Image (cartoon, helix red, strand yellow):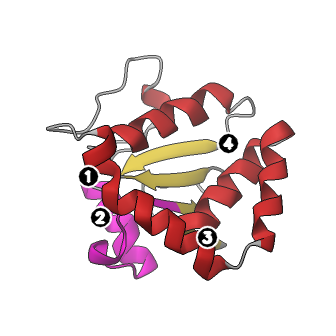
C-alpha cells in the first residue's frame, strides 16, 4: 500500500483520545528498535489504511495494529501484539492470552466505550514535535 513502509509496524489510533495519545507517547518512548509508525484513524491516510484492510471505521473505536503484507489485529489482540513487539518486560503481557479473547475484548470494549468520559477528548489530533514527526505517517511520507 502506498504511503505505508513495509518494514515498519503500523499503529492506527484515535487521534483525539487522550488515553490513546498517552499510550502512543508511552510506546514511542519505549520503541528502542524503531519498529513502530503511528497514524491517527481520523487522517486521510488512516482512512485509506482502514479501507485497504477492509475495516469499517464504525467497527473500530480505538486501535489497530497492522503488519504490512502480513496481518492486522485490533482490540485486545492488538494491545498484546504491541507489547510483544516492544520486547523486554512488556513481552510478558502475552500471558494474558490465556484469558479467552471474548473476555479480553469485553474489558477492552468497556474501557474504549468510556475513554472520552474518563480521560477526555481533544478538539483535533496531536501535532507531533519535529523530533517525533518521523514516527508518524501521513500522505507525504
The residue pinned by badge 2 equals: 47
Q: Circles 1 and 2: CB distance less than 8 Å? A: yes
Identify which residue is drawn at 32% across, 66% down.
Answer: 48
Residue placed under numbered mark 4 in the picture: 35
Which residue appears at 56% of the width and 60% of the height? 65
> Is 30 in front, or is 120?
120
Q: Please say if 80 is above or below 50.
A: above
Residue 101 pos. (x, y %): 65, 78
Mark linked to residue 120: none
Q: Position of residue 71 (x, y in %)?
A: 63, 74
Assess whether residue 61 is covered by the magenta stretch: yes
Residue 1 locus on image (x, y percent):
47, 66
Circle 3 crowding by C-alpha within 10 Å: few under 14, some 14–19, many from 20: some
Please tell me which residue lies in front, 140 or 24.
24
Viewer-nearest residue: 118 or 34: 118
Number of callouts in the render?
4
Residue 65 vertical placement versus 16 (above, below): below
Near-viewer residue (5 or 122):
122
The image quarter containing residue 18 is top left
Q: Are marks 3 and 4 in contact (CB under 8 Å)?
A: no
Q: Are marks 1 and 3 in contact (CB under 8 Å)?
A: no
Mark number, residue 104: 3
Residue stretch in magenta: 43-64
Instruction: Give how far across and how far down residue 123 sits, in percent.
Output: 14, 38
Residue marked by disc 1? 43
Mark 3 vs mark 2: which is more N-terminal? 2
Amino acid at each position: 500500500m502506498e504511503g505505508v513502509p513495509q518494514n515498519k509496524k503500523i499503529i492506527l489510533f484515535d487521534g483525539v483520545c487522550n488515553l490513546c495519545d498517552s499510550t502512543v507517547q508511552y510506546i514511542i518512548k519505549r520503541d528502542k528498535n524503531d519498529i513502530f509508525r503511528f497514524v491517527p484513524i481520523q487522517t486521510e491516510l488512516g482512512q485509506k489504511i482502514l479501507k485497504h484492510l477492509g475495516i469499517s471505521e464504525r467497527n473500530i473505536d480505538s486501535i489497530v495494529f497492522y503488519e504490512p503484507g502480513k496481518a492486522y489485529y485490533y482490540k485486545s489482540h492488538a494491545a498484546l501484539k504491541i507489547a510483544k513487539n516492544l520486547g523486554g518486560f512488556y513481552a510478558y503481557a502475552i500471558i494474558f492470552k490465556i484469558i479467552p479473547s471474548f473476555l479480553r475484548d469485553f474489558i477492552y470494549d468497556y474501557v474504549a466505550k468510556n475513554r472520552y468520559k474518563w480521560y477526555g477528548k481533544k478538539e483535533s489530533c496531536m501535532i507531533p514535535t519535529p523530533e517525533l514527526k518521523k514516527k508518524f505517517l501521513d500522505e507525504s511520507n
